[in-house]
Structure formats: structure tokens, C-alpha cells
Amino acid sequence: MRNKKFIIFDMDGTLIDSSSVIANSINHVRSKLSLEPMPQKQIVACINNSNIHAPSFFYEAPHFSKEHEQWFQEYYTDHHHIDTTLYNGVGKLLKRLRNSHSLSIATNAYKLSAMQTLNVNNISNYFDIIMCADEVKNAKPHREMLDVIVDHYGADRDKFVVIGDGERDIMAADHAGIDSILVDWGFSDHSEAVRSVGELEEILF
């Protein structure tokens, strides 16, 4: 991976531990829908599960509505500054990478939530381009966000690598013809994955 010059990061579960604010925001929406709260562990375990239909699973609805998005965002906005944090070693890694690589983000979070989280954790300035789910027609595992990033740089795909903690990240990379690295300190539980930021740093350098 030492020949990779363009690194595309997932955000939640990869750079940022946002498990609490995401789970609480989902439960805030559920409360508006008169649904019982779900355990945080259950929510976090299912966030990256590409086999579930998220609106049905989380809100017992056929699709996400504008009200769902509004209620989620109002809780997220009020709590992101106390309920999100960088994973251990991420800040140091990004500082080192920025001197030798071009960094970007492809996240299924919406733009407002993503920028609030990145800004409050003081890392938004490390990234040349931040692609979010509400800026494309198709979120991950579709390749669309990754294609936009590749086109932005105009470089060969073999110079890119996607780093994420979920199946959707790896599937999107495969669909886009880009190499990927799966990490396992976030929301998911993988049998074969990079276990620490230090190990990731060794792979990249």
C-alpha cells in the first residue's frame, strides 16, 4: 500500500467514534414515532449491515422521510460536540499523512452532520474533498461517491485506497475498481481486519 497517494476515508467508525450520538439520534426519531428505544449496541451493530433495510429496521417505515431526517439532525446538532471523538491515534496519523498523501472522505452521513462532526474534532482541514450521502444519487455501497473523488484528482485508480470499517466501504471500493483496507476498531466486528491505527500506519508507510 506504500504506492498509494490518494486515501479515501470513511468517517463514522473509522475516523470518528460517533456511536453514541448516532444511536441516540435514531432513538430520538423513534421516540417521535412512538417506538420503544433500541439498545445502543444493537443500533451500532446494524449501522454497517448491508443486508438490512434501514428505514424498516430502525423506524418501521418503507423509506426515510423528511421528518426522519429533520428529527435525526436536530438531536445530532445539539449533541455532536459532546458525543463524538477521534479514535486513538487518528489525529496523529492524519497529520503525518497530509504531508505525503492527498486525503478525502466518502461518508454515508449527510453533509451537515459530517461537517459538524469533522469541525468539532478539528480535522476537516485535512481533506481536499468530503463526499456525503445527500450529494449523490447513490450512497455506499454504490461507487458514485468514489468516482466523484477519483475524477476530482484525475489520477489512476491504482493510486487510490479506501479505508473503512464496514462492508459498504469495501463493496463500494470493489465496484469502483479501487483497493481497500478494512479496519476493526469501529462499529463492526471482523475476523480479518486491521486492528489498530498503529498497524494501519505501518501498512501505509
Image (cartoon, grey):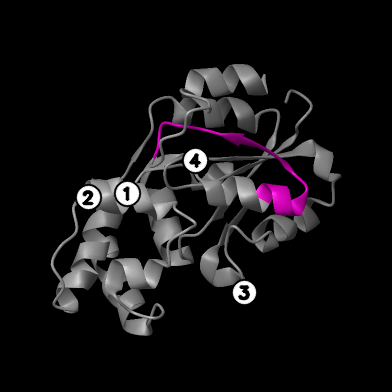
Q: CA distance from mark 3 to mark 2?
A: 29 Å
Circle 2 residues within 10 Å: few <14, some 14–19, many ≥20: some
For label 2, the residue is 40
The mark that comes first in sequence, 4 or 3, is 3
Q: Are marks 4 and 1 in contact (CB under 8 Å)?
A: no
Disc 1 residue type?
Val
The mark that comes first in sequence, 3 or 1, is 1
For label 3, the residue is 137
Q: Assess whether residue 184 is covered by the magenta stretch.
A: yes
Q: CA distance from mark 4 to mark 1?
A: 12 Å
For label 1, the residue is 44
Residue at 63% over, 33% down: 98
Circle 4 residues within 10 Å: few <14, some 14–19, many ≥20: many
Q: Nearer the viewer, mark 3 or mark 1?
A: 1
For label 4, the residue is 165
Q: Which residues are magenta?
A: 173-186
Front residue of 83 and 32: 32
Q: Looking at the image, is 27 positioned above or below residue 175? A: below
